[in-house]
Image (tube, coloured by chain):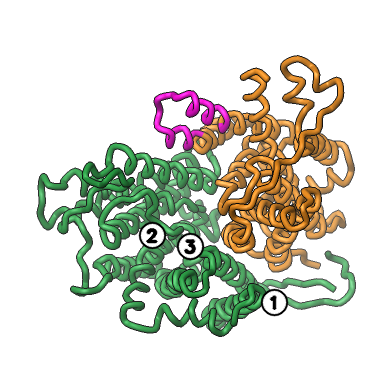
Amino acid sequence: MTMFEAILLTIITASTPLLIAAVGQLVVERSGVLNLGMEGMMIMGAACGFAVAILTGNSAIGIVAAIIAGMAMSLIFAALTLGLAANQVASGLALSIFGLGLSGVIGAPFVGAKRDAMPRLDLPVLSDLPIIGKALFGQDPYVYASFALTFGVWWFLFRTRPGLVLRACGESHASAHALGYPVLKIRLLAILFGGGCAGLAGSYLSLVYTPFWSPGMTAGRGWIALAIVVFASWLPWRAMAGAYLFGGITILQLHAQGAGVRIPSQLMAALPYLVTIIALVIIMSRRTGQQTAPASLGTPFVPDR
Amino acid sequence: MRLVLTKREDASPWMSLVSPLVAVALTLVSGAVMFVLLGLDPIKALGIYFISPISDVWALQELAVKATPLVLISVGLSLCYLSNNWNIGAEGQFVMGAIFGGAVAIATHGVANGPWVFPAMMLAGMVGGALLALVPALLKTRFSANEILTSLMLVYVAELLLDWLVRGPWRDPQGFNFPQSVMFEPEAQALRLMADGRVNIGSLIAVVVVILGAILLGRTLKGFEIRLVGEAPRAARFAGFSEKRMTWTVFAISGALAGLAGIIEVAGTMGQLQPSISPGYGFTAIIVAFLGRLNPVGCLIAGLFLAVTFIGGENAQISLRLPLDVTRVFQGMLLFYVLACDAFLTYRIRLVRGEGAAA
């Protein structure tokens, strides 16, 4: 494997969890809900996925557990913000703090445990292609799932009627309600989907990327995923571009450190966060009318009769 | 079956006092359930968490030390949240305050001395915190970039900056290569209130800040402006209040207070800069602000309560071998319950059987 292939491969593994989480969050925000609990849901996925995989000896069961953990976390958020019309920003923050704590408690017995990373799934013929073959077609199942997810979400949001209804809820919940659509039910499903994606993304970190459990291992990836959604102007394919941009920066700074570039390692480590800020600014300052956020984003909806 | 929310016409002041207490009670019950699940005696565990931190004089001093940064930060955050500015990067502003204030202490170390050093450090700390907080304010007002994300990203940047400083340029040359700065001179440390205790002047400053904050919000036009911008931005615009100027003001104030908390923590309890100087005060202060109902006096009470969880968590780590993360679980649950109880203040909530026209 050449150096180039190796870098490409690591970029893909760094980007995949960001993409899965961001695409899930994109659906949530398109329905008009801002769930800042990404970090908490993601790390719960990482902890539960790893714990269950160790206990059962089966990564697939671990992944299912991670998705369920993410959805369970998002259900708390849904109960607060939909059921009780609580402030979404504060509820999301609470979810992040709670998830970071609870994952530490759940994961504590598993610190130091090891599992082999999941095997890669070579697609025959395609993976023998020169240069890009190994990187694109010799990946673990998550990578293919993340591509499928991006396509599926795009198709759902922009090519199906339920997707249109979901977007309507995000643009104007009052109108969607007046047309007879169950706004809260739709938002509940979107929140659960986002939670499941966050859990899945978290399990990638503890089952494939590292692969072990350490407290706080998401290291702000949930927040970066939120930034990617803004960066992507709430469009799935741009979320993919965003995720790969951030994954690429993460990996390039690692390689630069490894190659002995004489810059403080802390500056390199701060790069993804700084780039997130700069990217947000650039995207917001170049934004034109049609690319703005869903109009009802973050406002609670209380149906009246 | 479904929940039906109807807006209350009258928000009773009595209930707004009761709801945080209900939230605390529900947190304790949930905590007991969690301890049972972890195979512990819930009464004993809750005792270690919530009674041991207030059981003797030494513990009460520790409580004041831990509550000080929480109260200072949360008063500033309350101003932000009241005016709909979501500064969640107080942790970074705390660190930046410690860096700026610490710079003064290190620059004067063994060179100049005098009673002016600590006040100068506090001033520098406030400037540092405010400068970092003004970055999201600038990006929000100039580019309408989301302040939640930008302020949070800067937390990581500030922490890495501190890490670099204490491992690199500011490392104590006589420190056996430990990543820490020189010990500050006595003049550069916060004044202790009791000769053999840990409480320092910072706790007094926090009380003063609470009083000033209460006066600002309750008795001045600026305080009215802050609340009006948050609750009725349209009306505030008609009244000629500038939302942008408000964003700058509250970010600067909250950043300065977080920075002040940072330098007080470093100069008061550690006496030097270290790679990690906060057990998450900046994030816990968000919970303090909400539990205190975005009211400075409420923040004082809530800050004391959350300080209890920090100390209880440390005690439980020693005597029950529980991970420190249990503290965060408590804090997260507490915020959940606070938010849920708040819903009962603004809405009448009824459970209705069967499917209604509205869902």
- The chain coloured green is B
Tell which circle, 2 or 1, labels the residue nearer the N-terminal end.
2
Amino acid type indicated by mark 3: Thr
**In the figure, B5 relative to A296: above or below?**
below
Residue named by callout 2: B222
For marks 3 and 1, give the CA distance: 30 Å
Q: Nearer the viewer, residue B251 or B91?
A: B91
Residue named by callout 1: B348
**In the figure, A203 relative to B55: above or below?**
above
- Where residue A288 sits: x, y (%)? 64, 31
- Point out the stretch of residues depicted in magenta: A250-271
Amino acid type indicated by mark 2: Lys
Q: Looking at the image, do the residues carrying marks 2 and 1 touch, with CB atoms under 8 Å apart? A: no
Labels 2 and 1 within one chain: yes
Q: Chain of mark 1?
A: B
Image quarter (top left, top right, bottom left or bottom right) of the N terminus of chain B: bottom right
Residue at the far top: name it. A130
Q: Nearer the viewer, residue B117 or A184?
A: B117
Q: Main secondary structure of the magenta part?
A: helix
Residue B150 shows up from this direction: yes
* Residue B272 falls left or right of residue B108: right
Amino acid type indicated by mark 1: Arg
Residue A36 shows up from this direction: no
Residue named by callout 3: B284
- The chain coloured orange is A
- Where residue B25 sits: x, y (%)? 58, 81
Query: Magenta stretch: residue A264 in it?
Result: yes
* Residue B178 falls left or right of residue B74: left
